[in-house]
Image: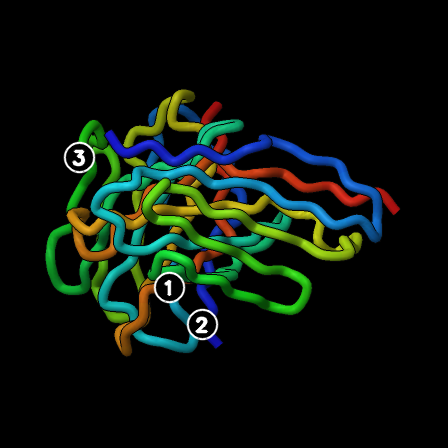
Amino acid sequence: ILNVEQSPQSLHVQEGDSTNFTCSFPSSNFYALHWYRWETAKSPEALFVMTLNGDEKKKGRISATLNTKEGYSYLYIKGSQPEDSATYLCAFHSRYSSASKIIFGSGTRLSIRP
Amino acid sequence: GAVVSQHPSRVICKSGTSVKIECRSLDFQATTMFWYRQFPKQSLMLMATSNEGSKATYEQGVEKDKFLINHASLTLSTLTVTSAHPEDSSFYICSARDRAGGREQYFGPGTRLTVT
């Protein structure tokens, strides 16, 4: 059974502060790691697809790193803003899963205090 | 681009009735769509993979006769919850992969089903 863990479950951050959270996944048979941002009443939005060990990706104030050997990815948000409040999901794609099957973590719910 | 719609967004039905949920890719063609279910405070659980023009592939433990999936065109997949029971109350969300390629899945906004 593939297990994808995210921590913490929830996080409250003061506006302007930077924050980060973790996604842990199996270190074997890695194919890709996805990050999504999911705001209430909206569709989950794809942030990053990461495929190579050591990958670092950036989108505005949000960035992510990937370590496939030890099975973790960090998502960083610099200078948090109220619009960053959302649930951040990671999803693991195994090399031996069916072509498009990905396994989701339960998410980190981020709240930004103005 | 890459917008997926889902309808309805909320539905309340009586026990024993059937409910159909539609998932549409609005600006791309999707040969593959996915149906997920989310229980409170849990992760998205894949129920089935829907392939255009062929039978859906169901995950272990998901009853195919209860959750009927039809993917009749490159832009539409439907999930019908048959003879719904209160334990079927949940959040159902679909996603689609662009036929043109890429690893991303594009999600709909989800449907909240309540069975009374």
Q: Is residue B43 left or right of residue A64?
A: left
CA gap, disc 2 to disc 1?
A: 10 Å
CA gap, disc 3 to disc 2?
A: 31 Å
Above or below: residue B22 compared with residue A9: below
Q: Chain of mark 1?
A: B
Which colouring convention does the figure follow? Answer: rainbow
Whichever of labels 2 and 1 marks the residue nearer the N terminus, that label is 2
Whichever of labels 3 and 2 marks the residue nearer the N terminus, that label is 2
State which quadrant residue B89 falls in. Answer: top left
Above or below: residue B59 compared with residue A45: above
- What is the secondary structure assignment of the residue under circle 2? loop
Q: Amino acid at mark 3?
A: Asp
Q: Which mark is residue B104?
A: 1
CA gap, disc 3 to disc 1?
A: 29 Å
Q: Amino acid at mark 2?
A: Ala
Q: At x 17% / y 35%, what residue is drawn?
A: B65
Asked if labels 1 and 2 touch by Cβ distance under 8 angstroms, the answer is yes
Q: Chain of mark 3?
A: B
Q: Which mark is residue B2?
A: 2
Q: Chain of mark 2?
A: B
Disc number lying in front (2 or 1): 1
